[in-house]
Image: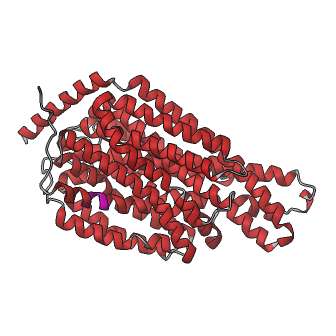
Amino acid sequence: MTVKDEGTAPDRAGLVLTALILVAGVANINLAVANVALPDIGKALDASSTQLNLIAVGYSLGLAASVLYFGVLGDRFGRKRLLIYGMVLTLPASLIAGFATDPNVLFCARVLGGISAGLAYPTTLAIITALWTGARRTKAIAAWSALGGAISATGPVLSGALLEKFDWHSVFLVTLPLAVVALASAWFLVPRDGGDQAVAVDNLGGVLSIVFVGATVLAINFAPMGDMTTAVWTLAAVAAITALVFVWRQLRIKVPLYDFRIAKRPTFWVAAVGGIVVFGTLMGAMFIGQQYLQNVLGYSTLAAGALALPAAAAMIVVAPQSAKLVESIGSRFTLLIGYGFIIGGLLISLTLWGDTASMWSVIAAYVLIGAGVGFAGTPASHSLTGSVPVSRAGMASSTSDLQRDLGGAIMQSILGAILTAGYAKALAESIQGSPNADEVTAQTQTALTKSFASAADLAQRYPQYETQIISAARDAFVTGDTRAYAAAIVIVGFGALVVFLFYPNAAKEREAMRRYATERDAVSEQT
């Protein structure tokens, strides 16, 4: 009879993991709090749909743009140090966002908050990778993934409750006490490390990665704006050029920022693509869903936020089972199970969320999407961290974080752009087909198609037309979000196909992971 090797864990493992989850929790709550407040922000700051999209995506943008670079800096200079720096920078970022009076300032504050999370959040997974091994690492990652995702899903509830009593500024200030607790926990509980002096840092590669991600996300967000065509093409060209130069440089330098020799392993790149789709879909669905619940169904901020709780509960329940499935049937089919649940949730949103929708259809969609993320999150992160040497744990953890936040930034941008374009087009057609079309000035039409919040504000100023304006705006919003959900189903289906075709089966995965573990041991002995 053979005894299963459970692996190793650090001293006071439970406390260390709790501190890391607290840090991750700060990043996850800050990531999620804006969505519920978007309708209020739109009204208070007279923000356009594109500005609201940027405010929603700004945090993911800052995080996704910085994680690759910061992950390697953590390997070089010490992961705990970056953890502390990130929590310290969170404080002014939250304060600036909390007291912003302009949508552009709020967007910049969100980007700064994302950069602070870029310092701290990927470092949490890098520390888990370095301090835990074997089955204990899988369980630790499952807890980190599930609780981090659950905290993210509870962010809307917290925001909704605050917005019942306070204005939208409060949602960006609420994490300050938790950030202080997380900072203290990280300072006293996480083991100190001095970094690896042998790790070289490709600073130029880091700058290129930041420019590439930033240009890509901004180009997608500006695409629906007819007067931004030149900017869109310029940003797209910058993104393409920096991507090519980045890849060329990483293949030529001795110690790359992003090692494509490791990244080309199927257990690595397929898991990275899978994670981008999975986590991006969660964030995109929450982004659109929160606006739909308030704008179309008329839910209060608290009720809309509370309806995200079933997704959080599903993640918590499913994640431990996901860890067991990874050990028994492998990551490939565990990922595919997650994709199946997510597609089921999106199909409910597409077919049942119209001008009216029952609360049970909303809960069912969120439960399925949450369960899908719970199933797929663990194998996506586990495969990445298991495919690299411990000396490159920063690369693995940065990629794990990148898949969440680049996925979130891209999916929110794509779905937000489709929603914005669909809403504007549908409402413009509704205006043109109305009996009083000749009485609608160009200025009024611009205000109506700018965003749902702008249309609602105009309706209040012209109460005699309020019913018609709100009805047309709701119909247009449903048209836009239906197109967005259809696009999301296509993207998730493509991701599932990639996993099915290219990720190794359980036997080949186990053999590859054993080979990579030997490689890690050899690297550790040399250093």
Residue 151's place in the image compared with 380, above or below, is: below
- Across and down, in percent, residue 233 comes to 57, 45
Q: Nearer the viewer, residue 260 or 349?
A: 349
Q: Residue furthest front?
A: 1
Name the residue: 81% across, 49% down.
429
Q: Position of residue 474 (x, y in %)?
A: 73, 56
* Position of the C terminus by quadrant: top left
Whether residue 224 is visible here, answered yes or no, is: no
Asked whether residue 117 appears in the rendered view, the answer is yes
Which residue is painted at 85% across and 66% down in the image? 465
Q: Quadrant of residue 318?
A: top left
Task: Answer left or right for 83 relative to 229.
Answer: left
Q: Nearer the viewer, residue 172 or 425?
A: 172
Q: Is residue 102 above or below residue 120?
A: below
Q: Main secondary structure of the magenta part?
A: helix
Q: Which residues are magenta?
A: 19-23
Nearer to the camera, 470 or 230: 470
Residue under the point 42% across and 36% down: 274
